[in-house]
Image: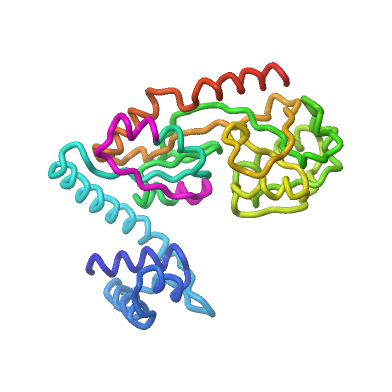
C-alpha cells in the first residue's frame, strides 16, 4: 500500500467520479482505475460500488476516515520540518464562505507575520468541515454554527445583515422593514448549505411564512449584482455595503433581532497545528476582526432594529 494509492483513493472517494478525479490528479483514467483496483485487491475487499458510476461503499467510508487521518499527519510532519528549515516562514491554508470576509484580517496578518504565506480557498460550511477533517485546510471561517465534536471554534465577530433592493424598489427609502412586510417579495439568495439561505429561511420561519425564491446560486458574491439587475431583493452582510465593490443597490435594516451573522474561526480539535497556523490563530483572535467603521455600522444596525 503506497502513499500515491492512498492519495488517489481519497480524491476518488471525495468526487465519486473517475474522470473528474483523473483530471484533478492529472493522470490518465485507466491508470487511476488500475491503482484503485490494486488497492482493493491488497485490502481484500471493494471500496466502491460500480453501478453506472463509482460510489463509496461502507468499506470505503470506514477506510477513508483512517486514510484522511494518516495523510493529514504526514502533511503536518512535512510542514513541521518546513517550519524548522524556514524559521519564521511557512504556509497556512484558510477557507471562507466569501473571500471578501478575509481582506481586512489578511492585511493585519501580513503586517504582523510577513514571512508566512496564506493560501485561500472558497467553500461552503459543509465542505469546510470535510476539509478540516481531512487536513486539507488549517482553518475555516464560516457564518454557520458548528455541531461537530471533533471541531473547535471561536467567535470572531457578529455583524448585521442588511436588506438589499434594486434602487427603483418602492421601499428603497425605508430605513427598517419587518420581515412580515416582505413575504410577497421575490428573493435572490443562495442554494441551501450557504449561510444566506439558512438565515433567510430562519427569519421567515420566525414570521410564520415561506420566502418566494426567484433566483438561487452557489456563488454568494453575485447576489448583490443580481439584486441590482432587478431580479429581487436579498440579504447582504454589512461589510459588502462598506466595501462598495458590487453593483449599486438600496439598503435597509431588517426589523428583526435575528438579522445578523456570526463569523467563527474553526479548526480540528485533535490536530496539533503547525507553527504558521498557530501564528494565524493568535493574530486573528487577538485583534478586532472588523474595523472601527464596521463596528459603528453594527451599533447603528442594532439601534435601528
Look at 29% across and 51% down and name the residue there: 72
Look at 29% across and 34% down and name the residue there: 278
Task: Give the quadrant of residue 271.
Answer: top left
Can you see residue 58? yes
Give how far across and how far down residue 81 sits, in percent: 16, 46
Side of 253 where 168 appears, left or right: right
Between 100 and 135, the one nearer to me in the picture? 100
Image quarter of the N terminus: bottom left
Side of 187 where 71 appears, left or right: left
Image quarter of the C terminus: top right
Give how far across and how far down residue 150 sits, in percent: 40, 41
**Magenta stretch bounds:** 107-129
Q: Is residue 77 magenta-colored?
A: no
Side of 188 where 125 appears, left or right: left
Task: Give the quadrant of residue 143.
Answer: top right
Look at 37% across and 41% down and name the residue there: 268
Q: Above or below — where is 59 with respect to 302? A: below
Give how far across and how far down residue 208 sits, in percent: 81, 36
Give how far across and how far down residue 166 sits, in percent: 77, 42
Look at 66% across and 19% down and name the residue there: 300
Between 222 and 168, the one nearer to me in the picture? 168
Can you see residue 197? no
Q: Is residue 119 magenta-colored?
A: yes
Q: Above or below — where is 217 with respect to 45? A: above
Amino acid at each position: 500500500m503506497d502513499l500515491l494509492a492512498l492519495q488517489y483513493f481519497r480524491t476518488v472517494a471525495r468526487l465519486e467520479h473517475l474522470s473528474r478525479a483523473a483530471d484533478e490528479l492529472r493522470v490518465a483514467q485507466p491508470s487511476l482505475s488500475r491503482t484503485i483496483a490494486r488497492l482493493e485487491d491488497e485490502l481484500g475487499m471493494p471500496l466502491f460500488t460500480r453501478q453506472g458510476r463509482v460510489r463509496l461503499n461502507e468499506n470505503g467510508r470506514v477506510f477513508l476516515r483512517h486514510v484522511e487521518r494518516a495523510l493529514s499527519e504526514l502533511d503536518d510532519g512535512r510542514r513541521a520540518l518546513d517550519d524548522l528549515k524556514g524559521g519564521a516562514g511557512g504556509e497556512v491554508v484558510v477557507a471562507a464562505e466569501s473571500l471578501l470576509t478575509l481582506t481586512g484580517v489578511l492585511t493585519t496578518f501580513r503586517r504582523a507575520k510577513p514571512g508566512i504565506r496564506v493560501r485561500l480557498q472558497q467553500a461552503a460550511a459543509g465542505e469546510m468541515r470535510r476539509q478540516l477533517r481531512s487536513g486539507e485546510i488549517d482553518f475555516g471561517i464560516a457564518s454557520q454554527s458548528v455541531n461537530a465534536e471533533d471541531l473547535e471554534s471561536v467567535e470572531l465577530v457578529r455583524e448585521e445583515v442588511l436588506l438589499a433592493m434594486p434602487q427603483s424598489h418602492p421601499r428603497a427609502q425605508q430605513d427598517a422593514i419587518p420581515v412580515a412586510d416582505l413575504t410577497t417579495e421575490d428573493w435572490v439568495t443562495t442554494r441551501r448549505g450557504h449561510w444566506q439561505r439558512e438565515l433567510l429561511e430562519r427569519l421567515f420561519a420566525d414570521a410564520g411564512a415561506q420566502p418566494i425564491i426567484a433566483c438561487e446560486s452557489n456563488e454568494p458574491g453575485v447576489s448583490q449584482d443580481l439584486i441590482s439587475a432587478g431580479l429581487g431583493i436579498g440579504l447582504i452582510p454589512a461589510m459588502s455595503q462598506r466595501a462598495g465593490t458590487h453593483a449599486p443597490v438600496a439598503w435597509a435594516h431588517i426589523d428583526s433581532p435575528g438579522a445578523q451573522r456570526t463569523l467563527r474561526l474553526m479548526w480540528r480539535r485533535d490536530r496539533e497545528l503547525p507553527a504558521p497556523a498557530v501564528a494565524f490563530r493568535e493574530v486573528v483572535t487577538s485583534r478586532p476582526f472588523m474595523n472601527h467603521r464596521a463596528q459603528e455600522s453594527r451599533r447603528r444596525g442594532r439601534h435601528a432594529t
